[in-house]
Image (cartoon, helix red, strand yellow):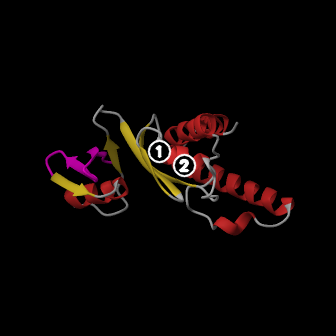
Amino acid sequence: MDRYRALLIGPTDGTWRITVPHAGEAVVTTPRLADFEARRLLGLSADHDVELIGPAGTPVYVFDILFTDVRDPALDVLASDPPAGCWLDPPALHCARPGLSRLAAIADLAAELRIGYGLEAGDLGFERLWEWAGPREWGERMVAHLLLMAVQRARWLGLPEEALTSFVHTAMP
């Protein structure tokens, strides 16, 4: 499979610049659109992967962490001094972070939020926020459900078991 790369630089005056070698440049207001714009410049469909590269030449991964308690005082600290590559727009912390892999970038941020801000990173925005209401049994079943999904999808992607266990050990206190 061909590997496509795009340089991601920003934010500058609220915008991000994407440069695709031999294809052109685009400007977006959020890095979440960077891979879409890179694929557009290359004339590729959505099923092609584009690796975003930061100014230092390392991969950059774009993701959001959601917080369910927007009244948590720790979010005020997070808003005034967010982790590198992130900005808070409650209820989400939007990030464009370097890492050895996407899992490593998310796990490292989860550990940084826990240790530096006293916040638990528990949601990437895929589930309904109210799903945890109810008895402990329901919560345990949901955790098992999410872990089984993670294991199955990691296997489909060819991720090694160590990537998952490393993620859990880094992200969990």
- Where does label 1 land, which residue? 80
At 30% from the left and 31% from the top, the residue drawn is 56
Q: Position of residue 48 (x, y in %)?
A: 34, 56
- Tell me if 62 is positioned left or right of 38 in this view: right
What amino acid type is highlighted by mark number 1?
A: Ser
Q: Please tell me whether residue 16 belongs to the stretch shown in magenta.
A: yes
Question: Which span is picked out in magenta?
Answer: 1-23
Q: Position of residue 17 (x, y in %)?
A: 23, 49
- Where does label 2 land, which residue? 76
Q: Please tell me whether residue 55 belongs to the stretch shown in magenta.
A: no
Residue 20 at least partly seen: yes
The answer to whether mark 2 and mark 1 are in CB contact below 8 A is yes
Q: Residues within 10 Å of mark 1 (few under 14, many from 20)?
A: few
Q: Position of residue 94 (x, y in %)?
A: 45, 52
- Tell me if 77 is positioned left or right of 15 in this view: right
**Quadrant into which the C terminus falls:** top right
